[in-house]
């Protein structure tokens, strides 16, 4: 089922779990991340705790409250430490499958979920009702 965008006219300040495709967000900027993927992931994830509890707009202009952040890492980035306030999911194989299963787990538990990725194939695999935002949304919030 295709992921959905936040509907217009929806409730303002809806609490959401934000699931981040860390590799995709890192890869959205040519800042040398490929030289040391683990260090780049550490730097990116270390900035995320400041978003927890904040009310932020999604691309369509609606507002959400970032209830928690789940950062999905893969490859060399699996070794990073989890900063306080961020749940780190270490993908055993590919990050996309871990993101899909994480999204399913949270939506099955009744949480509203926003996934941050530009990967269209991944977006198409997400459970129904999941909101999506691209990497620029996250990097803008982080001031990166």
Image (spheres, rainbow, N blue to C red):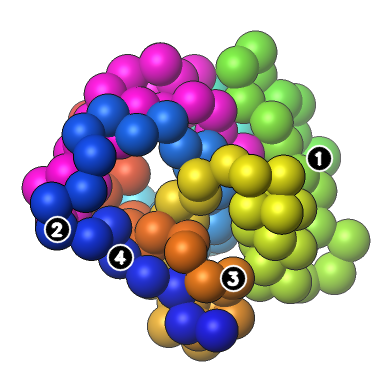
8 and 120: which is toward the camera: 8
**Residue for point 52% across, 71% down:** 128
**Callout 1: few (<14), some (14-19), or many (20+) C-alpha neighbours within 10 Å?**
some
Q: Is residue 132 magenta?
A: no
**Residue for point 75% across, 26% down:** 81
Q: Nearer the viewer, mark 2 or mark 1?
A: 2
Is residue 100 shown above or below 19? Answer: below
Q: Is residue 51 magenta?
A: yes
Quadrant for the C terminus, please.
Answer: top left
Left or right: residue 105 compared with residue 12? right
Q: Earlier in the sequence, mark 4 or mark 3?
A: 4
Where residue 28 sits: x, y (%)?
35, 62
Q: Nearer the viewer, mark 1 or mark 4?
A: 4
The secondary structure type at the circle numbered 2 is: loop
* Residue underneath mark 3: 127
Left or right: residue 59 compared with residue 14? left
The secondary structure type at the circle numbered 1 is: helix
**Callout 3: few (<14), some (14-19), or many (20+) C-alpha neighbours within 10 Å?**
many
Give the residues drawn in magenta, as a range. Answer: 48-72
Distance Cα–Cα, label 1 vs label 4:
32 Å
What is the number of the mark on residue 8?
2
What is the number of the mark on residue 79?
1
Q: Earlier in the sequence, mark 2 or mark 1?
A: 2
The secondary structure type at the circle numbered 3 is: loop
Where residue 35 sits: x, y (%)?
55, 55
**Residue for point 80% across, 57% down:** 91
Quadrant for the N terminus, please.
Answer: bottom right
Distance Cα–Cα, label 1 vs label 3:
28 Å
* Residue underneath mark 4: 5
Where residue 68 sits: x, y (%)?
54, 28
């Amino acid at each position: 089922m295709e992921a959905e965008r936040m509907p217009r006219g929806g409730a303002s300040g809806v609490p959401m779990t934000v699931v981040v495709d860390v590799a995709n967000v890192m890869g959205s900027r040519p800042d040398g991340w490929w030289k040391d993927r683990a260090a780049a992931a550490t730097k990116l994830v270390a900035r995320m705790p400041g978003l927890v509890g904040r009310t932020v707009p999604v691309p369509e202009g609606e507002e959400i409250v970032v209830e928690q952040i789940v950062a999905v890492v893969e490859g060399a980035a699996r070794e990073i430490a989890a900063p306080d306030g961020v749940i780190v999911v270490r993908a055993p194989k590919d990050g996309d499958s871990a993101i899909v299963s994480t999204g399913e787990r949270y939506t099955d538990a009744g949480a509203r979920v926003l996934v941050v990725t530009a990967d269209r194939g991944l977006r198409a695999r997400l459970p129904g009702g999941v909101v999506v935002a691209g990497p620029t949304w996250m990097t803008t919030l982080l001031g990166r």
